[in-house]
Amino acid sequence: MAYENYKGIDSVTVADVEALGIPSELAGEIHKKLTRIVRNYGSTTPQTWHHISKELLSPKLPFSLHQMMYYGCYKDFGPDPPAWLPDQKNAGLTNIGQLLERRGKEFLGSNYEDPISSFSDFQRFSVSEPEVYWKTILEEMNVSFSVPPECILRESPSHPGGQWLPGARVNPAKNCLSFRKRTLSDVAIVWRSEGNDEALVEKMTLKELCESVWAVAYALETLGLEKGSAIAIDMPMDVNSVVIYLAIVLAGYVVVSIADSFAPREISTRLMLSKAKAIFTQDFIFRGDKKIPLYSRVVDARSPTAIVIPNRASSLSIQLRDGDISWPDFLERVKDSRGLEFVAVEQPITAFTNILFSSGTTGEPKAIPWSLLSPFKAAADGWCHMDIKKGDVVAWPTNLGWMMGPWLVYASLLNGASIALYNGSPLGSGFAKFVQDAKVTMLGVIPSIVRTWKAKNSPDGFDWSTIRCFGSTGEASSVDEYLWLMGRAEYKPIIEYCGGTEIGGSFVSGSLLQPQSLAAFSTAVMGCSLHILGDDGLPIPSDVPGIGELALGPLMFGASSTLLNADHNEIYFKGMPVLNGKVLRRHGDVFERTSKGYYHAHGRADDTMNLGGIKVSSLEIERICNAADENILETAAVGVPPAGGGPEKLVIAVVFKDSDNLEHNLDTLMISFNTALQRKLNPLFKVSSIVPLPSLPRTATNKVMRRVLRQQFSQADQGSKL
């Protein structure tokens, strides 16, 4: 949404407010409040917007008023206007704020001022003093080791990422079930199934969770597998899959994460790469009125022994293969052990606990093992950046096949919070009502979900005021869509969160101790250093704005050190520049550091295109095209090499909200795209063609597969269809 389309707020009249469909009397009251705020704080300051968002706007008022206020306030502000500001009182109540109030001077000496002013110094401290920092964070999270580490970090030329917590033995699931942060009667999981939206939210206490996990762990022992064997989970993320996940880890086995959307071939690939010895799955998945087979896909993948859970009935209605086991029969094996504590299998810190997979958009997916460090990296990110703590209720629509599934388990339970699970589609009003009824305090999203919510107005009429903050990951977000999202929860902050499966969490994020700008990251994650590579392949100075491929400092707690089916060193370290005697770690994303110190993601380095000799990221073009017409749901921009050679042609795939009268609209839309791109990006850019699609191809982790589109469009171009 262009700021130039709006008046400055000091020029807004009562008539302007009335024109948005607001009754005259209410419009007068709004204008009176606005006049008072502008008089007190000016017309273009962050404090002005802060008071407008807290005192004037509400979810019940038209979003067009929110837009008028935000874009009008920041019309002449420049880049990265803050949509949310921290205050000292609430900052001091955060996890990091409380830690700094107690020990800030110990960590930072005379440079320490207060949690807000000193946050950036503390982030740098977390990188320069990993021994002190990580010892402190593990203590703050009450992590219990059966054998404590010899030290926090041992650096070695043969281990470019360092050796973390050497000598330690631990079990992450045991820590999740610990009583050290809560009582047995505290709620650990809340959930509801789609279609039961008027029913009470179901709850599982910590005591009930412990007993359920212990029972499954005992039943796992009856399979006769060696410790360290891989056991797959291919099912939706519900209370059963969380119990199974924790039981596999508690009993000393390795979880293999498989998304429930995968076809048999993809399931088979992941089972073979991980050498899984068993798999947990469901008979069917219900999505609205649809009944989607799952067990049959697992059978077609020629899986090992399957333990099959009935979705909504107490017993299975399908015939199982010989050797497969129904969930009731599986639990019946250990009925005499119910209620007995299972003694956790404590393992060396380097042992695998979870095998996850890269998206696999081209060729075989990378098989990425999480060591026992990774769960604590995920939890530390939640503790530091989303401020997750005892009493929180954390929801994030996801799946155990994506790293955010295990992240949700660990970031919630290791920090004493409750997990909130909705068994069904998160796109409709049922999920919005669940957020209200479960009293969710931290709601995680991906931008495409928010886009659908906004188009359908799914949260309308529901109270999201318990939310303390949002988290967002998975793809680049939109300023306008996230302004709308903040407005649904009385302008609570959105913490952007970008990382990777091989990181165990994030490397760049936001913080409740810093001003947050929409669709931007405010800080490197605690314990991480970021380096933007210039055209010469070397890092540009950390205080200089710039754009380029992102490299990471190699000493990252919880990051991968091996791959099951590829050379880890070749993929992440070979050919990378050396900084201060340490080779940097490759990530592959293009990032921009702005003049105000924020970071913007510009997609994968291989999602850039060359238009007439000018390199540009797909995301830059898509942000502009998405705002070009109100009927656009989303776009994907790809550069297509012409069949006869020459410069790449810019092709835009478009998903429309309403697909009627497309032929007439495409001509008009082509003009709108070119006008906007040439005005806002480069006067030489020109869209070659527009391709309407019912949806964009995506990976299981919801990333747009632009390579697939590029390949399709290239083939079409060779056939003269573009």
Image (cartoon, grey):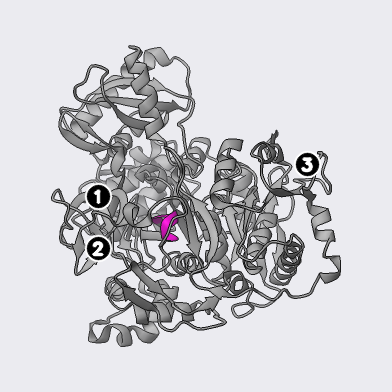
* Image quadrant where residue 626 sits: top left
Q: Which mark is residue 321?
A: 3
Q: Which residue is mark 2?
A: 583
Q: Please name the amino acid that badge 3 sits on.
A: Arg
Determine whether, in the image, residue 74 is placed left or right of residue 291: left
- Which mark is on residue 549? 1
**Taking 635 as reference, is 351 above or below it?**
below
Depth check: give the residue in front, 712 or 582: 582
Question: Quick one: quadrant of the C terminus?
Answer: top left
Mark 2 crowd level (few <14, some 14–19, many ≥20, 10 Å Cα): many
Q: Which residues are magenta?
A: 496-504
Q: Nearer the viewer, residue 364 or 83?
A: 364
SS at mark 3 in the image: loop
Nearest-to-viewer mark from 1 and 3: 3
Q: Would you say 371 lies left or right of 50 here?
A: right
Magenta includes 497?
Answer: yes
Which quadrant does the N terminus fall into?
A: top left
- Image position, residue 437 (x, y; %): 64, 55
Question: Distance of mark 1 from mark 2, alpha carbons?
Answer: 15 Å
Label 1 sits on what residue type?
Answer: Glu
Q: Give the residue displayed 59% in from the left and 40% down from the top.
A: 261
**Marks 2 and 3, how far apart at CA:** 51 Å
Secondary structure type for disc 1: strand
